[in-house]
Amino acid sequence: MSLRITVLYGSYREGRLGIRAVKHVQQHLESAGHSVTIVDAKAYDFPILNKRYIDYDEGKIPPKVQELHDLFQTGTDAFVVVSGEYNGTMQPGLMNLMDHFYTEFFHRPVGVVTYSMGAMGGARVSMHLLTTLCVFGMSPISTIFGIGVIQNKLDEQGKSLDDNLSKKSDSFAKELTWYGNAFKEAHAKGRP
């Protein structure tokens, strides 16, 4: 069953390497037959959080906030969060983007993709992400897809330069698909 998957990415840095991971994941999920939407925090460039979607008066919601609310609430079956490690935690742009919303994420599966220029592939940020995503009411899949030495593993278009990475990508996509379909079927019967 085809899923609508939204990929969240939060780096604002110059020369950001994580966009390679975003493209790589997008390619694998689309080749599995899914529809993928990329939400790049830098492109939306929300100000530091002042109000969440639910805090705005009706008719005063900024259009970009409304657009993402609609996408998350009714246009997404599963999420993927792609994050590098910034001082052992997630990217501030990603956290700020997500903080503008809350209930939109409830009862949705989420895959975690981390990366770094070093060998650990963002291992420290993955633990922080798992806790944060659960607070948002999401259900992380068990596979964490870490990409170490990203500059040597993916080219600028997101194409894998490593056969082992391609195998990990396929496993990640299969597991996210399984969870996404299970949740989609459950959502058709109603939500808790």
Image (tube, rainbow, N blue to C red):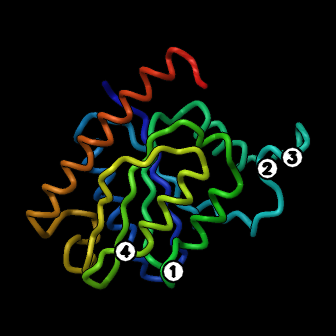
| Disc 1 and disc 3 in contact, CB within 8 angstroms | no
Reading the image, the residue beneath label 2 is 62
Tell me, for residue 13, which label it has, or none.
1
Reading the image, the residue beneath label 4 is 122
Total label count? 4
For the residues labelled 3 and 4, the Cα–Cα distance comes to: 35 Å
Q: Which of marks 3 and 4 is in front?
A: 4
- Which residue is more in the foreground, 33 or 118? 118
Instruction: Answer with mark 1 or mark 4, whichever residue precedes in sequence.
Output: 1
What element does badge 4 sit on?
Answer: loop
What element does badge 3 sit on?
Answer: loop
Residue in the image at 45% along x and 51% along y? 7
Reading the image, the residue beneath label 3 is 56
Residue extending farthest to the left is 163
Q: Is residue 117 left or right of residue 10?
A: left
| Disc 1 and disc 2 in contact, CB within 8 angstroms | no
